[in-house]
Amino acid sequence: MRIIGIDPGSHRVGYAILEKQNRNKIDVLDYGTIEVAPKTLISESLIIIHDDLKKILKKYKPEISSVEELFYFKNQKTVSAVYQSRGVILLTLSQNKIPIIEPTITQIKKGITGSGTADKSQVKSGVQMILGIKNLKGHDDSWDAIACGFVGLSMFRT
């Protein structure tokens, strides 16, 4: 079973490709971020996110997806852009007929660390320990996407 985990953002979208070989073995095939330059118009950002995500889907052919559910933001301008990005992500996945699981951030944190209130460093440590990754590279958005994919695998029911 191959899954893409996605941590939505307006200018940085974390993604991770995980593959479950058997009950106990999960491999991280790839992870990273879709980057959009700061000050890029949202209309252009959405196209970049869509096009880059399509390339990732074509390359890895995930069977399911896990996209972090958004719950609240302090900054109204930020939340609007992230929701628009998330909409493009959901549309792209749907166009490619990939089922979508939507865990909340609390479910993701609890699934990785045992605590729904874990901070970023605890999530990173949990991902490293559970999946046996010694040195996580890149942005925390990609680590969050790994965690999202891992939890999505546990939530998926065939």
Image (spheres, helix red, strand yellow):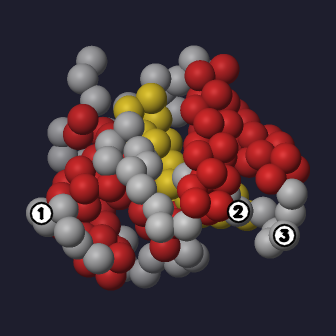
In the picture of the structure, the residue carrying the numbered disc 2 is: 11
State whether residue 31 is above or below residue 129: above
| Mark 3 vs 1, N-terminal side | 3
* Separation of residues labelled 2 and 3 (CA atoms): 9 Å
Secondary structure beneath label 1: loop
Side of 110 relative to 50 (left or right): left
Looking at the image, which residue is at 23% across and 40% down? 154
Please identify the quadrant where the C terminus is shown: top left
| Mark 2 vs 3, N-terminal side | 2
Looking at the image, which residue is at 86% across and 57% down? 41
In the picture of the structure, the residue carrying the numbered disc 1 is: 114
Q: Quadrant of residue 155?
A: top left
The amino acid beneath tag 3 is Lys
Secondary structure beneath label 2: loop
Q: Quadrant of residue 136?
A: bottom left
Q: Residues within 10 Å of mark 2 (few under 14, many from 20)?
A: many
> Nearer the viewer's eye, disc 3 or disc 1?
3
- Where is residue 24 shown, x and y percent of the image? 18, 46
- Where is residue 72 shown, x and y percent of the image? 42, 56
Looking at the image, which residue is at 87% across and 50% down? 44
In the picture of the structure, the residue carrying the numbered disc 3 is: 39
